[in-house]
Amino acid sequence: MIQFLTPILLLFLLIVSYIFSIVYGNRRSGTTKINLPPGSFGWPFVGESLSLLRAGWDGVPERFVRERVEKHGNPLVFKTSLLGDRMAVLCGPAGNKFLFGNENKLVAAWWPLPVRKLFGRCLITIRGDEAKWMRKMLLSYLSPDAFASHYAATMDTVTRRHIQIHWQGKEEVNVFKTVKLYAFELACRLFMSLEEPNHISKLASLFNIFLKGIIELPLEIPGTRFYSSKKAAAAIRTELMMIIKDRKMALEEGKASSSQDLLSHLLSSSDENGRYLTEKEIANNILLLLFAGHDTSTVSITLVMKSLAEHPDVYDKVLREQMEICKSKEGGELLKWEDIQKMRYSWNVVSEVMRLNPPVTGAFREALLDFEYAGYTIPKGWKLYWSAVSTHKDEANYEDVMRFDPSRFEGTGPRPFTYVPFGGGPRMCLGKEFSRLEVLVFLHNIVTNFKWDLLIPNEKIEYDPMATPAKGLPVRLHPHQV
Ligand code: HEM
């Protein structure tokens, strides 16, 4: 998420924060001397943000943390200045454990300004009991208990149709672009029962404009990307509000079922005190889930396909596991939740892909009060950062760290807090199980239909902001002969 911010936005934020830090910082330094972590706030205005961005663009996002740990000689924590904020980076499993374990006590979730402005009131922009309540409402649809019974079959249906239209009969495919279409269509279908292709593609176009503003200067001036993004977000919300109103009426008239999708579920469910989400909260949260859900899964599937092409022995083992599942089913029978549980080796492969290239490289928190960490003081209001990518790529946590080896996930798997692609604690990714299902259903369908070669061997992976092959991973397809 850090890499979302362009240099212009950084400059803007840094100027604002510099002025703020002069006013606020002087007030604090006039009182007592604080024992801050080692590190550097970098250049006036830009801090160390450009080093962080450059590491991502160069495809080595872990470099930012590694270099500073070596330079400042402390493997646990260092201070820096990023995105216009003074920040402490808490490194490795100890830092992850501390941040995940202290949510709502010492720290709370925090996202940069453009994110907060664009998403409005929804799960990621609220904290404390309110956030707990909203998470519970959303999880009652997104937890495995809720979707195990019917999601697998619906996902399988959508995936088969997608493969038939976008992959079969093609010699070459751009994996990232094509899978992105798939993930968006799947989310529209499962969250809101949208199936009409024109409606979905209208929303997808608005969504692409919306996404560009998340990485821009939050200036509401016509012509800027942020302005266009805010307008696109408003247009998406208008669409969503219409869909919500229609559905509300259909539910009242008994023409829709309360369990048909996320939307019906949110409209029909209240908490134990009879409190419902408002229509606006439902629209904002669906916007969030469409955003959080489709790019992350797209990245995972794309990188899994890259790894399988690079490791034919691993591809063969995945294919064998998936063919066993095919053999256990009647011709044409759709996947069930129990089939997903049998995909153990395939999930180890996905996990190893996410270890080496976590789709989300890390996330932020904010200090709710002054507290001590590793012998240093973290002042109230400072931002904190935990890094999945530098934890995953540290020799201290994984032997022969760069070797692709799915067997790391056999048995009890990696040590606690050394594998954190979905974060942890009360703010852990809400869509973990959903994405597991989505990635495995896709993997089942793609390997049982095709083998593929990479058209650009060793294609560079750039983090901007998520791990993406520079050219989108073009591949040549080889359908299995039946
Ligand atoms: C491979 C796929 C995915 C990865 C790697 C991923 C990763 C993450 C990470 C690292 C966080 C931040 C956790 C933290 O701050 O501690 C997060 C939060 C979140 N994710 Fe995911 N995610 C994925 C898929 C999804 C999907 C499919 C959905 C929705 C269906 C989703 C919904 C969310 C939401 C709503 C949050 C915010 C949770 C909160 O603040 O309480 N994610 N995700």
Image: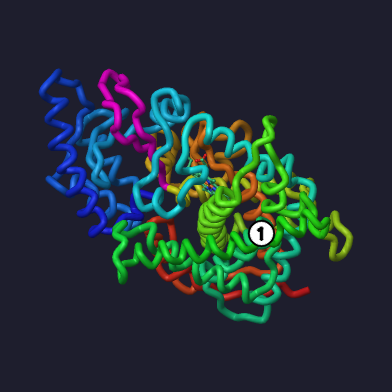
Residue 418 placement (x, y as % from top left): 47, 34
User: Quadrant location of residue 255?
Assistant: bottom right
Q: Residue at x 64, y 48 (%)?
A: 434
Label 1 neighbourhood size at 10 Å, few (<14), some (14-19), many (20+)?
Answer: few
Q: Is residue 458 visible to the viewer in this orientation of the structure?
A: no
Query: Where does the magenta region start and end?
Result: 361-386
Q: Residue at x 59, y 59 (%)?
A: 241
What colouring method underlies this structural image? rainbow
Let me know if residue 227 is in the magenta part.
Answer: no
In the picture of the structure, the residue carrying the numbered disc 1 is 245
Which SS class for mark 1? Answer: helix
Residue 177 placement (x, y as % from top left): 52, 70
Q: Of 86 and 468, which appears nearest the observer?
A: 86
In the drawing, does residue 320 fall left or right of residue 175?
A: right
Query: With respect to residue 448, does 71 lie above or below?
Result: above
Q: Residue at x 74, y 75 (%)?
A: 481
Let me know if residue 362 is in the magenta part.
Answer: yes
Q: Of 146 and 165, which appears nearest the observer?
A: 146
Counting the numbered discs, the total is: 1
Query: With respect to residue 160, does 13 lie above or below?
Result: above
Amino acid type of disc 1?
Lys
Residue 299 placement (x, y as % from top left): 51, 58
User: Quadrant location of residue 91?
Assistant: top left
Q: Of 91 and 50, which appears nearest the observer?
A: 50
Residue 278 placement (x, y as % from top left): 60, 46
Is the C terminus in the top left, top right, bottom left or bottom right quadrant? bottom right
User: Quadrant location of residue 8?
Assistant: bottom left
